Image (cartoon, rainbow, N blue to C red):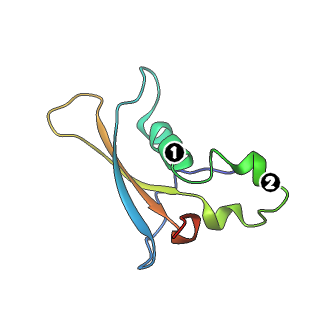
Amino acid sequence: KLTYYTPEYETKDTDILAAFRVTPQPGVPPEEAGAAVAAESSTGTWTTVWTDGLTSLDRYKGRCYHIEPVLGEKDHYISYVAHNPYIFEE
């Protein structure tokens, strides 16, 4: 199963790190919202197009490796996502 929420992931020196403020819809866990952000900011929008040619999706996907609540704001979170630099164009 492909998942973009990977709290066990240890970031690499080469990763491009991003922090996204997330407000999940009611009933959606913050982990699911963080995973959706990681997917949409990496391979989630083009995997169906590249399925035949992309043999290492796990290598290129964004990884939501940490989520923390925004202090003083209910149901608001910061999702930390690591990206492989090779998914970006120069």
Picture layout, residue 76 above or below residue 66: above
For the point 46% across and 57% down, the residue is 7
- Point out residue 52 in the picture as x, y percentages from the top left corner: 85, 57
Question: In the depicted view, which residue is nearer to us: 59 or 27?
Answer: 59
Q: Amino acid at mark 2?
A: Thr
Question: In the depicted view, which residue is nearer to us: 71 or 13?
Answer: 13
Residue 58 placement, left or right of 24: right
Label number found at residue 60: none
- Point out residue 43 in the picture as x, y percentages from the top left corner: 62, 53
Q: Which residue is mark 2?
A: 51
Label number found at residue 35: 1
For the point 49% across and 65% down, the residue is 9
- Point out residue 32 in the picture as x, y percentages from the top left corner: 50, 38
Tell me if residue 1 can be seen: no
Q: Secondary structure at mark 1?
A: helix
Hey, which residue is sitting farthest left in the picture?
72
Residue 84 placement, left or right of 52: left
Give the distance between the C-alpha atoms of the residues marked 2 and 1, in whole angstroms: 20 Å
Residue 49 placement, left or right of 8: right
Q: Secondary structure at mark 2?
A: loop
For the point 41% across and 20% down, the residue is 26
Count up the numbered dots. 2
Q: Which mark lies nearer to you, 2 or 1?
A: 2
Picture layout, residue 14 above or below residue 68: below
Q: Image quarter for residue 54? A: bottom right
Crowding near the residue tagged with mark 1, few <14, some 14–19, many ≥20 C-alpha atoms within 10 Å: many
